[in-house]
Image (cartoon, helix red, strand yellow):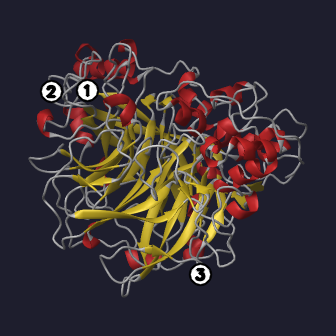
Amino acid sequence: MLKRHLPMVGHTRGNRSAVTCALKCGNACAHPVPNTSENPHFRDIANAAISRRAALGLGGGLAAAVVVGAQAVSTAPTAEAHGGTHPKGGGKLEFRALNGVPKTVDDVTVPEGYDWKAIIRWGDPLFADSPEFDITAQTGESQSRQFGYNNDYLDVISDGRDDRRGYLVSNHEYTNENIMFSPEYIASNPEDVVNAGIAAHGMSVVELRREGRGRPWEYVRGGRRNRRITGFTPFSVDGPAAGTDLLKTVEDPTGARVLGTLNNCAGGTTPWGTVLSGEENFDQYFVGTGSAEEARYGLGTTPTQRTWETVYDRFDLNNEGYANEVNRFGWIIEMDPEDPESTPVKHTALGRFKHEAGTAVLSRDGHAVVYSGDDQKNDYLYKFVSRKRYRRGDKRHNMTLLSEGTLYVAQFTGDSPAAEIDGSGKVPSDGAFDGRGRWIPLVKNDRSLVPGMTVEEVLVHTRLAADQVGATKMDRPEDVETNPVTGKVYMALTNNDKRTVATVDEANPVATPGGGNRDGHVIEITERRGDHTAERFGWNILLLAGDPAKSESVYFSGYPADKVSPISCPDNLAFDSEGNLWISTDGAPGKIGFGDALHKVTLEGRNRGRVEQFLSVPVDAETCGPVIHDRDNSVFVNVQHPGEDGEWGKHTSYFPDYLPASGPVQVRDRVAVPRPSVVQVFSTTGNNGTGRGRRH
């Protein structure tokens, strides 16, 4: 159902760069916060809890009683889980930390003793018959057979044995047509531009090979597992909301089959070897009808930035028969990277919201548990626990684990008097920002636990259900990851300029004048008895981010602030084999003036809270999807949206292929453009470097 394509509309201001805000999340920061519920910020809950404890003579011991027995959670053996391995153990990445890199450096900056290479770039051909990348002739057909744009989530998995073969899986979050196509091409090929944009979204599976362990990987064109999943790929739908009226459209009267996945952000590899991916800022692709349900998810009623609705009717919810099309996005999807012919699934049992992350782990008794943040200011943290249990070696059964179970939303309570949480970031008198929390169930199997809402209403309009039960408003919950060594859970909260002194609480304690929580923070969660299925947990703030040289609202679990690398806007999280936390950032250039980066954070012992910068990405880029293979002395990152602030003919970056001093570059009669890429950083010394930081 084609229509005439209209010119792209302009950009508005945002929290990152104006362009990134417009295209990554549809200027979410420039619009009113969708959560207008009267849920108390947990400051009110904390005051009530403190009063109850005082009356009962319990003091501060109640919160401490929740934090017990954090042990590593049992998981499937790595070789079985993946048909290969995440290399683990035996390695430790040693490096001399960087201390901020100017945001104007158009390069990946790494420590002395390391080097980097791009494994694969936007537009690289995946199949033997894929067309070569040609910036002057990108179409939906060519893009559907090439590596997609703006890669976010990443995993790199070795097949084991001699460690010479493996594969990577990467998400493709969004597109920036203004630097992907010339204005002339957009004007003369409008439908090709739309189709290429839709095809550049989704996911890629890419076969890898290398000469041996510790050596750089190369991608294999025509590899057995190579696959593109796009905005046109058929998906099945399962779980309690599948087939219900809220998911039916004129093109899919069954409500059980959806075309495409959009705005895929963070994800995770399951213990049974599949990959999960979260659909995040899906609202920006649709013209809404103005309903209250749509408003809660941030949908507007005006033409979209990309104007896909001018080519495909399904992106305009006002068209007859398409009112529910937006309900078919905002899910956790699951795909099998080992089977390129398999149909990926959208799991309704995990709820519909702006999923950042889909981190799967097994509980002690074999239930699958998935953590996910809802990436919007004042939204919530969620957890899903499967009804069925994992079966070793039974992949078909295990791929049904996420079809039915209990969906929870988190409520946090602090243990300090409200007067001590004043927005300054000053540590309370008990020496820590900490407390307890509980998981509030929303759905159990096929039964709603939210009064007045059916199970399909809870799962399709999950934000409204969470509003109703009193979930805690958080400062943009992004990636949520579990520590493979301790079993503890970590949540990145990127920032929240809407946080005020009147609404601060112990889990969101910063509100600087005119800036709210500008730099973000990280929370550490310990499930009761170390069991991921528990409905109670303890929590503490690991760090309040910022540049210690410029801000007093910083905290690093007691580690001296003058001895850490500056860090702002934590986004994606990862772990090395020793259980150290690695944090990639999104938005640091606009907050502390340095390029976005990847940092290592020590979690145990006397150096707990020490932040050490490992790398920085090029101009306008974001660091995404870190993967730490310390046995191989390698780190992988997705370099997303390099040169985002540029425009055609005035690019601000030429990463990764060209690093000119200034001006546009012509190579073989083609204009050089920035290309989002998967990058491997590897040791060049054998025993890693400890020298001063340098650029490649």
- Tell me the crowding category of disc 1: few under 14, some 14 to 19, or many 20 or more residues within 10 angstroms, Cα based: many
Type of amino acid under label 1: Asp
Instruction: Evaluate whether residue 245 shows in this view.
Output: no
Q: Secondary structure at mark 1?
A: loop
* Disc 2 to disc 1, C-alpha distance: 9 Å
Type of amino acid under label 2: Asp
The residue that appears at 61% across and 69% down in the rendered structure is 125
Disc 3: which residue: 224
Picture coordinates of residue 38, whole percent (x, y): 53, 18
Q: Mark 1 or mark 3: name the one nearer the start of the chain.
A: 3
The residue that appears at 18% across and 37% down in the rendered structure is 557
Q: Mark 2 or mark 3: name the one nearer the start of the chain.
A: 3
Disc 2: which residue: 430
Picture coordinates of residue 693, whole percent (x, y): 20, 52
Picture coordinates of residue 633, whole percent (x, y): 26, 68
Q: Secondary structure at mark 2?
A: loop
Residue furthest to the left in view is: 606
Disc 1: which residue: 415
Lateral position of residue 429 relative to residue 174, left or right:
left
* Pointer 2 with pointer 1, Cβ within 8 A: yes
Type of amino acid under label 3: Arg
